Image: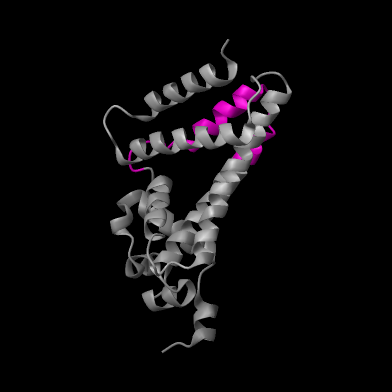
Amino acid sequence: MAGPARARKNAPPREEVLAAAMATIAERGLDGLTMAGLGREVGMSSGHLLYYFRSKDELLLETLEWSEGRLGGERRALLSAPGTVRERLDAYVDLYVPDGARDPHWILWLEVWNRSQSAATDAAARARQAAIEGAWHRDLVAIIAEGVSRGEFRPVDADRFAARLRALLDGFSVHVAVGIPGTGRPQVLDHVREFVDESLTGP
């Protein structure tokens, strides 16, 4: 049996494992993601995967963090993009809302939060999940505050408004991700634009 040193030497880069996990979720859903199957994809045994990730819960959380890191780069780019603040807010919403039913990032997000309710989930894992949410919130607050300061948006408490808007986005996004009829991505984007018009730019 290979020891820890041998396992470290033979292991593929961690990002390769996380990318393979996300690709499996996109192709076959969460039920199709097993440690044995993922191991075959990256040339590792399920035992070696468990050595690195300790549990499937940790693998899922790290995969979510990896996916969020990529989305975070897109958010930072849109925050510094030229154009109006409203255009940047629309781009943020477009990035936030799932692409459609069974969007792999959102299905993973829902699964990780569901698993976090287990008594076995430690405070550190919950804090990592909260950090993901915090990054989305801070960026939205920054967009709203900039719109207010430039006079594009009516005066609002940016933090409170961001909390309410994200609650709206989360609710609609869950509906899109699980495929509830009548709440597809186009309908949701229309609802959110109408809410923003009424709340931030309307008379």
Quadrant in the picture for the C terminus? top right
- Residue 168 seen: yes
Q: Hey, which residue is sitting farthest left in the picture?
A: 181
Q: Position of residue 45 (x, y in %)?
A: 38, 76
- Residue 95 seen: no
Taking the magenta stretch, the answer to whether it contains residue 83 is: yes
> Left or right: where does residue 175 sit relative to residue 156?
left
Check the image and report above or below for 40 versus 183.
Answer: below
Q: Position of residue 36 (x, y in %)?
A: 33, 70
> Left or right: where does residue 114 sit relative to residue 134?
left
Q: Quadrant of residue 77?
A: top right
Residue found at x 61% / y 28%: 88
Residues 39 and 167: in front is 167
Residues 106 and 196: in front is 196
Residue found at x 38% / y 60%: 115
Q: Hey, which residue is sitting farthest top in the picture?
A: 203
Residue found at x 48% / y 22%: 195
Check the image and report above or below for 158 versus 135.
Answer: above
Colour convention of the picture:
one colour
Q: Quadrant of residue 81?
A: top right
> Left or right: where does residue 56 sit relative to residue 13?
left
The residue stretch that appears in magenta = 75-102
